[in-house]
Image: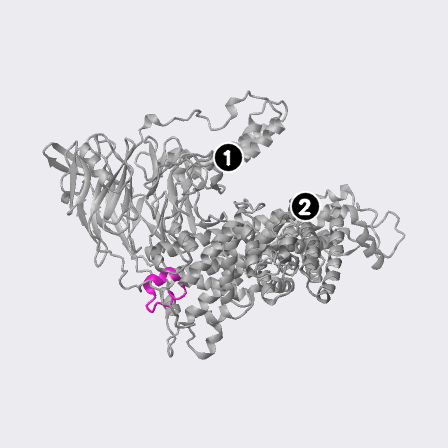
């Protein structure tokens, strides 16, 4: 038994993740199931399940105890040697254990049980465990019932295979006196059903408890010192950890600790606001605020990319005739000056996005390395480098596969169409622009290849079955964008609490130097998040969650993010009040801030 | 200790308390009030008489009576009873079945039903409030004096702006805003028997409403001009076994919402944006009737229907248990810094005070309360000799509010029901929390003739002192300002000036 628990715990530890992986299409789900890692997980769980079932069978004694039993003596007492027969009940038990182990492993994958949800409120470990226990028992009983039922069905259809196999390999006879179990009457044995169910409950309870305890211990708050007391502790202090790239779980714990200290602990806040002893630099605050801001900026970029993809889909779905009426007609492009002005004019029709472009550039300068995720940066960069400047937003999306593959796309078929459209257009453009043909040649072949690829894709996407596997669930892809939003929520809360506390506690004014940047980031993010919730397919309300054992809170993280973003902004504006008018932000953001000050958001 | 005998005599009948200035309450006639109210910040003085409210068009809550009764088979009936009521419904259905045969099933279910009834009555004898109907239960535990009969059932000021919500007898809620003329009226299918309301702090317009069956969270658009927001704006937070909800409290940091029901021993901590909830279970006490979150966010008072209440510490969520001698805790309020709790118990006309060590955040999981509660005011019945005759004032305390500066305390004293002369009045105290806690008499407030106070609330951000809003039993809502210079000035001088340095030191 202890071996089983140990192995299961090892698997729990090995497989945990703070960020759930959400399969966007059914094919991805199947891919996950046949992934070698998952196969090993399943096989080991099945073996462990069998082991537990064997233990249970031995413990129950009676008719379940041994695989081989002496046959019931037949009428004719010819055989002096009692022959050994197969105990089908024992086999049934072992197989049910294996089946439950496999089912558990499958559900573990499908329900993202390796995801570690962090609790809404802090509580002591014992209390959390006690709170979860009744639910765990109930959940286990019900699930075990379902497993046994499914297993009975499976055994009814396929039970003869292992039976025959075992009896031939181990040279055991099948007792003809007893009812075979893979018939209806055999399976209607209540005692067998009850024992199998009990064994399942036992197995699942031990496994779930191990899982629950691991979850509780892993998400327990950890206290990171803000300032090292000894030199060797430098690596363990909060600003250092936030700025390095530790395993995600440590980063999560650090951010959680930041949120807690900013909210509850004046003494530790004081350490954050303090200046370094020789030199007088606010290293702690700078490190913490920089990391939080870069996290939030990353999220902004990702959302913009996603919105851009969605908007492009929307446009591509319009009839092809309308595509031609887009601003870049070939005639306009023959003109030599394809400089920034024309690009401006091209972007100008997309006035809705222009503000985002501006604001997304500002943080780009401050945080190097974050510029890969943005499709907006690509036209600008190509402009500067002078490559094939077609300066169209369409062209940006031609090269965007690299980008959009990173951020999840919404509808594959939709974006395929859009790519097609852009390629048809880019041909006349290229020739008209009259760029050196040597440079164009490989490009043309490449685009031709891509074109073919798109055509094949288009062809395939019309087949229903393939569509079924490839089509992306919009909800799932949205969930995937926000899968690690817990980090951002904590960053928001920590930052806003620190800024609010700085109004009275910051003696050296270290926070004020970063206040415009913080406000800028928050307001930009607010704008982007607002826009995100206006997209089609985005529900504005969280789905109903039934109180089940398996946590699905990752599905609603985006709503939590939206709420905490607004609260964070209000926290800052409520504390600072009219003083915010003196902070240097753009006029657009100033207008927004004024609305926050008047409680009209 | 302060007692009612130290109070100045109540104002003459016919006079109305208008405001407090120079430490004395000024009374006057009705027309003076009208002229005076115009000077005050444009807060609406409302009159919501009972007659104008449309009563329920139908008394039954289900649509069943509107349809012709249709006989269905026993099997179907059981199925629907199971869906609607649960096990008890199925048993009842079987016991009342008219089919022949099945005799033993019918008698068996009858016995089972009897056992169920006996068990529930046993439970009810332990906690008598469980045998009340849910409406009676709300009426018993609500902060409103006459919840069942009065037009106004609940009242809530927005924590940051001049905006308040009023829940009315006809189960609608109206939101009044001093800056806008539109008065949204909120109605929802599930919004029935509203017991309490609370605005979300650090937010423009999110209102949580405690209803009979659930908690509704209204998301109102502050810029919208619509007077009838659709029920799609409301989020429904329900939890099995957690109804009726009688009290709500938002965390001052705006992230969590607490809800309490006298039937459920657990109070629920809601993460409203994701609709997740965490149960905070404590057995004993039989339920939770009243919640009050301290303004600094560190502690929560949770009163129970039996003679016990608890104070939770809001970081690690551990609690201290406080058994009371006389009866259940009726109401309580926190000082602005969260270091002192004033509470009253049913059956005793005194105010108790409980002090807590100052919250530092380092003592995780400790509430830090003092060992015993002390009596700070005695409000037992006192006779006042006035020019117009004798007046007897005093009795049990029904509700109590402390203003955000911590300088005024208003208390609704309920007269004895069997003594006709005794009346329900509002007494106001002057308070000081530091260095020593002090409670000094200020005076009685009087409304129009025949008007009994129903609900009281302080304006959360009145600049010139404190502003008490009183809802009267006549359906009138009036505002009584207390003008004083607060000693509790926010220390803005020590904070750095918000001018931004053009070049940062560190970068």
**Viewer-proximal residue among A570 and B410:** A570
Camera-side residue: A174 or A445?
A: A445
User: Which residue is farthest left?
Assistant: B387
Q: Is residue A435 magenta?
A: no
Using the rendered image of the protein, determine whether residue A226 is visible from the camera's viewpoint. Answer: no
Tell me what residue is drawn at x 45 percent, y 37 percent: B213
Q: Nearer the viewer, mark 1 or mark 2?
A: 2
Mark 1 to mark 2: distance in Å?
A: 73 Å
Start-end of magenta stretch? A498-514
Element at label 2: helix
Q: Position of residue B134 (x, y in %)?
A: 41, 35
Q: Which residue is mark 1?
A: B115
Q: Disc 1 on helix, strand or loop?
A: helix
Residue A193 in view, yes or no: yes
Residue B344 x, y percent position in the rendering:
28, 45
Residue A29, position as x, y percentages in the image: 68, 54
Which colour assignment does the render follow? one colour
Q: Residue B243 lies in what quarter of the image? A: top left
Q: Which residue is mark 2?
A: A320
Q: Residues within 10 Å of mark 2 (few under 14, many from 20)?
A: few
Does residue B26 lie above or below B374 as drawn?
above
Quadrant of the rendering where the N terminus of chain A is positioned: bottom right
Q: Position of residue B302 (x, y in %)?
A: 37, 48
Q: Look at the numbered discs 1 and 2 and tell me whether their residues touch, using CB distance below 8 Å.
A: no
Residue occupying the far right of the picture: A78
- Decide if residue A473 is on the left or right side of residue A255: right
- Compared to residue B153, the image places residue A467 above or below, namely below
Q: Chain of mark 1?
A: B
- Mark seen at residue A21: none
Query: Numbered disc 2: what chain?
Result: A
């Amino acid at each position: 038994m202890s071996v089983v628990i140990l192995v299961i715990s090892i698997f729990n530890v090995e497989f945990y993740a703070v960020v759930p992986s959400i399969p966007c299409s059914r094919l991805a789900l199947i891919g996950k199931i046949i992934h070698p890692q998952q196969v090993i997980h399943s096989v080991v769980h099945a073996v462990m399940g069998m082991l537990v079932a064997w233990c249970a069978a031995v413990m129950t004694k009676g008719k379940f105890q041994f695989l081989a039993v002496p046959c019931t003596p037949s009428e004719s007492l010819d055989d002096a040697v009692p022959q050994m027969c197969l105990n089908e009940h024992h086999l049934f038990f072992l197989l049910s254990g294996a089946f439950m182990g496999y089912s558990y492993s499958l559900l573990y994958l499908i329900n993202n049980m390796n995801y570690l949800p962090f609790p809404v409120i802090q509580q002591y470990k014992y209390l959390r465990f006690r709170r979860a226990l009744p639910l765990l028992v109930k959940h286990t009983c019900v699930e075990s019932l379902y497993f046994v039922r499914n297993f009975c069905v499976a055994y009814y259809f396929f039970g003869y295979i292992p039976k025959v196999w075992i009896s031939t390999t181990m040279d055991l006879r099948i007792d003809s006196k007893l009812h075979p179990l893979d018939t209806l009457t055999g399976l209607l044995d209540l005692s067998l059903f009850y024992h199998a169910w009990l064994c399942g409950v036992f197995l699942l309870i031990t496994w779930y408890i191990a899982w629950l305890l691991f979850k509780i211990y892993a998400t327990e708050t950890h206290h990171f010192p803000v300032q090292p007391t000894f030199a060797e502790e430098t690596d363990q202090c909060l600003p250092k950890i936030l700025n390095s790239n530790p395993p995600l779980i440590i980063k999560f714990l650090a951010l959680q600790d930041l949120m807690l200290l900013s909210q509850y602990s004046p003494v530790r806040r004081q350490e954050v606001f303090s200046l370094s002893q020789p030199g007088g630099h606010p290293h702690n605050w700078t490190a913490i605020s920089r990391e939080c801001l870069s996290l939030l900026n990353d999220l902004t970029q990702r959302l913009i990319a996603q919105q851009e993809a969605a908007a492009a889909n929307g446009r591509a779905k319009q009839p092809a005739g309308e595509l031609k009426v887009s601003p870049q007609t070939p005639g306009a492009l023959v003109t030599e000056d394809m400089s920034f002005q024309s690009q401006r004019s091209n972007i100008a029709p997309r006035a809705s996005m222009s503000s985002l472009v501006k604001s997304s550039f500002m943080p780009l300068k401050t945080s190097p390395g974050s510029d890969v995720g943005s499709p907006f940066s690509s036209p600008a960069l190509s402009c500067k480098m002078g490559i094939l400047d077609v300066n169209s937003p369409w062209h940006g999306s031609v090269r965007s596969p690299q980008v959009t593959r990173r951020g999840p796309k919404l509808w594959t078929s939709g974006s395929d169409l859009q790519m097609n459209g852009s390629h048809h257009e880019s041909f006349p453009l290229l020739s008209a622009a009259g760029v050196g043909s040597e440079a164009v040649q490989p490009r043309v072949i490449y685009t031709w290849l891509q074109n073919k690829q798109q055509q094949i894709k288009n062809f395939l996407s019309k087949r229903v079955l393939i569509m079924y596997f490839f089509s992306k669930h919009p909800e799932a892809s949205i969930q995937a964008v926000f899968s690690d939003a817990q980090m951002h929520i904590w960053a928001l809360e920590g930052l806003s609490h620190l800024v609010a506390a700085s109004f009275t506690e910051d003696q050296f004014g270290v926070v004020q130097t970063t206040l415009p940047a913080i406000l800028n980031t928050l307001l930009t993010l607010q704008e982007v998040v607002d826009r995100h919730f206006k997209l089609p397919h985005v529900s504005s309300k969280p789905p109903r969650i039934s109180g089940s054992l398996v946590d699905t809170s990752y599905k609603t993280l985006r709503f939590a993010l939206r709420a905490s973003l607004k609260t964070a902004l209000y926290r800052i504006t409520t504390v600072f009040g009219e003083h915010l008018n003196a902070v240097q932000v753009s006029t657009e953001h100033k207008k927004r801030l004024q609305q926050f000050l008047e409680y009209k958001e | 200790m302060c007692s009612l005998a130290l109070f100045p005599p109540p104002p003459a009948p016919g006079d109305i308390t208008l405001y407090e200035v120079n430490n004395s309450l000024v009374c006057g006639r009705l027309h003076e009030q009208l002229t005076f109210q115009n000077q005050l910040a444009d807060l609406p003085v409302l009159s919501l008489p009972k007659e104008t409210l449309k009563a329920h068009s139908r008394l039954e809550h289900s649509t069943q009576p509107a349809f012709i009764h249709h006989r269905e088979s026993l099997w179907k009936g059981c199925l629907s009873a199971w869906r609607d009521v649960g096990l008890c419904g199925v048993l009842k259905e079987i016991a009342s079945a008219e089919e022949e045969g099945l005799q033993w099933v019918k008698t068996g279910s009858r016995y089972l039903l009897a056992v169920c009834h006996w068990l529930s009555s046993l439970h009810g004898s332990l906690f008598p409030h469980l045998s009340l109907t849910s409406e009676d239960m709300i009426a018993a535990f609500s902060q409103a004096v006459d919840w069942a009969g009065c037009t106004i059932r609940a009242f809530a000021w927005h924590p940051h702006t001049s905006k308040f919500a009023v829940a009315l007898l006809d189960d609608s809620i109206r939101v009044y805003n001093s800056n806008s003329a539109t008065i949204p009226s909120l109605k929802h299918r599930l919004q029935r028997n509203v017991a309490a309301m609370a605005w979300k702090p650090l937010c423009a317009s999110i209102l949580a409403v405690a209803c009979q069956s659930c908690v509704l969270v209204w998301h109102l658009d502050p810029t919208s001009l619509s007077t009838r927001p659709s029920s799609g704006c409301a989020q429904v937070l329900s939890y099995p076994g957690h109804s009726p909800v009688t009290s709500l409290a938002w965390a001052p940091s705006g992230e969590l919402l607490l809800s309490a029901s006298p039937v459920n021993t657990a109070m629920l901590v809601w993460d409203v944006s994701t609709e997740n909830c965490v149960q905070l279970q404590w057995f004993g006490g039989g339920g939770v009737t009243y919640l009050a979150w301290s303004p600094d966010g560190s502690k929560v008072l949770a009163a129970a229907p039996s003679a016990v209440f608890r104070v939770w510490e809001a970081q690690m969520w551990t609690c201290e248990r406080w058994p009371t001698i006389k009866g259940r805790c009726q109401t309580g309020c926190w000082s602005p810094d969260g270091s002192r709790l004033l509470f009253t118990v049913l059956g005793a006309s005194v105010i108790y005070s409980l002090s807590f060590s100052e919250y530092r955040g380092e003592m995780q999981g400790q509430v830090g309360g003092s060992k015993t509660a002390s009596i700070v005011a005695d409000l037992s019945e006192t006779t006042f000799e006035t020019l117009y005759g004798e007046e007897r004032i005093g009795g049990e305390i029904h509700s109590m509010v402390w203003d955000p500066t911590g300088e005024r305390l208003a208390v609704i004293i309920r007269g004895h029901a069997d003594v006709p002369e005794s009346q329900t009045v509002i007494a106001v105290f002057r308070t000081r929390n530091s260095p020593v806690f002090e409670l000094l008499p200020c005076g009685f407030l009087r409304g129009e003739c025949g008007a009994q106070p129903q609900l009281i609330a302080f304006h959360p951000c009145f600049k010139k002192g404190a502003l008490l809003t009183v809802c009267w039993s006549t359906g009138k809502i009036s505002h009584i300002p207390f003008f004083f210079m607060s000693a509790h000035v926010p220390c803005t001088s020590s904070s750095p000036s918000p001018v931004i340095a053009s070049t940062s030191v560190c970068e």
